[in-house]
């Protein structure tokens, strides 16, 4: 059903807009030709192929309200009524309250429509799940990186707590590659050694770090194995034998 449009000399628009302008006093109700509006209502309704009684009834009720409001405001106020109250009740009060409520619902609906339009500009993305390939199952008793770093921290702590020996020693610069060869030399076949046994009696920080890096590189190349029987047990290092796996 198309929206009903009321055509007047000074105003053109839907009926709800006309009533809104009345409540805002932008159009004087005395200047609205009620008879002309009612005639337009009836002509429009008769042209509808399928009569919708509820809608037609609403239009007729609204026209009747306008006519009643104009009639009441044109009638003179009796002197007795003026004596009883300083200000007579405005006959438009009920209609204004209905229009204000209708206007409020329109504003709320427009605000919700705006929120819906804004929400359509956002796209929800589910949390990313890491592929199973990133999780490597370790063999029982295998040494993790946290175990090696923990052992290094313990050695450095013990070194700081030890009584310093005052001596002058020319520190020998040893590369990681050289230290890798030294570690392989210390590891006899079929025997294991602890990380601490690969160090000197009073190891320097550079010796500890270089030895740790050498062990990590040898593990990466698959030349040695590191195992730990329990969380408190020392890490033991041994040569990897031929055809030996991590099981």
Image (cartoon, rainbow, N blue to C red):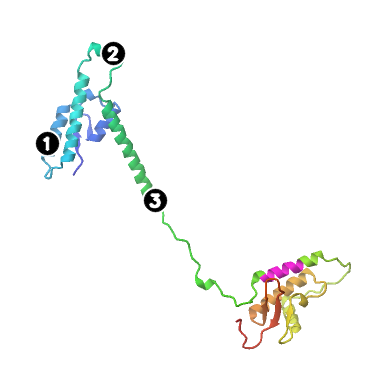
- Of the numbered discs 3 and 1, the one sitting upstream in the chain is 1
Question: In the image, 199: left or right of 52?
Answer: right
Res 88 visible: yes
Whether residue 127 appears in magenta in the rendering, the answer is no
- Of the numbered discs 2 and 3, the one sitting upstream in the chain is 2
The alpha-carbon separation of the residues under discs 3 and 1 comes to: 44 Å
Query: Which picture quadrant has residue 227?
Result: bottom right
Percent across and percent down for residue 64 are: 18, 29
Between circles 1 and 2, the one closer to the viewer is: 2
Report which residue position mark 2 lands on: 84
* Residue occupying image coordinates x 77% and y 65%: 157
* Residue occupying image coordinates x 14% and y 28%: 35
Packing grade of label 1 (10 A; few <14, some 14-19, many >=20) is: few
Percent across and percent down for residue 122 are: 41, 54
Report which residue position mark 3 lands on: 119
Q: Label for residue 102? A: none
Residue 86 lies, with reference to residue 16, above or below; the image says: above
Res 22 visible: no
């Amino acid at each position: 059903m198309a929206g009903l449009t009321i055509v007047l000399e000074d105003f053109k628009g839907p009926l709800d807009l006309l009533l809104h302008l009345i409540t805002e006093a932008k159009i004087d109700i005395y200047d609205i030709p009620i008879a002309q509006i009612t005639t337009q209502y009836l002509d429009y309704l008769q042209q509808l192929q399928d009569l919708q009684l509820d809608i037609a009834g609403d239009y007729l009720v609204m026209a009747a309200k306008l006519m009643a409001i104009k009639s009441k405001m044109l009638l003179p106020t009796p002197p007795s009524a003026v004596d009883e109250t300083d200000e007579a009740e405005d006959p438009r009060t009920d209609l204004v309250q209905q229009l204000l409520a209708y206007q409020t619902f329109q504003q709320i609906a427009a605000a919700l429509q705006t929120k819906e339009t804004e929400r359509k500009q956002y796209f929800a993305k589910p949390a990313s799940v890491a592929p199973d390939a990133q999780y490597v199952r370790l063999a029982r008793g295998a040494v993790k990186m946290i175990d090696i770093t923990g052992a290094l921290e313990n050695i450095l702590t013990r070194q700081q707590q030890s009584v310093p020996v005052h001596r002058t020693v020319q520190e020998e610069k040893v590369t990681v590659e050289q230290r890798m060869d030294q570690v392989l030399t210390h590891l006899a076949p079929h025997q294991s050694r602890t990380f601490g046994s690969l160090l000197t009696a009073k190891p320097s920080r550079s010796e500890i770090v270089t030895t740790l890096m050498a062990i990590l590189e040898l593990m990466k190349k698959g030349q040695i194995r590191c195992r730990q029987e329990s969380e408190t047990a020392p890490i033991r290092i041994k040569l990897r034998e031929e055809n030996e796996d991590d099981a």
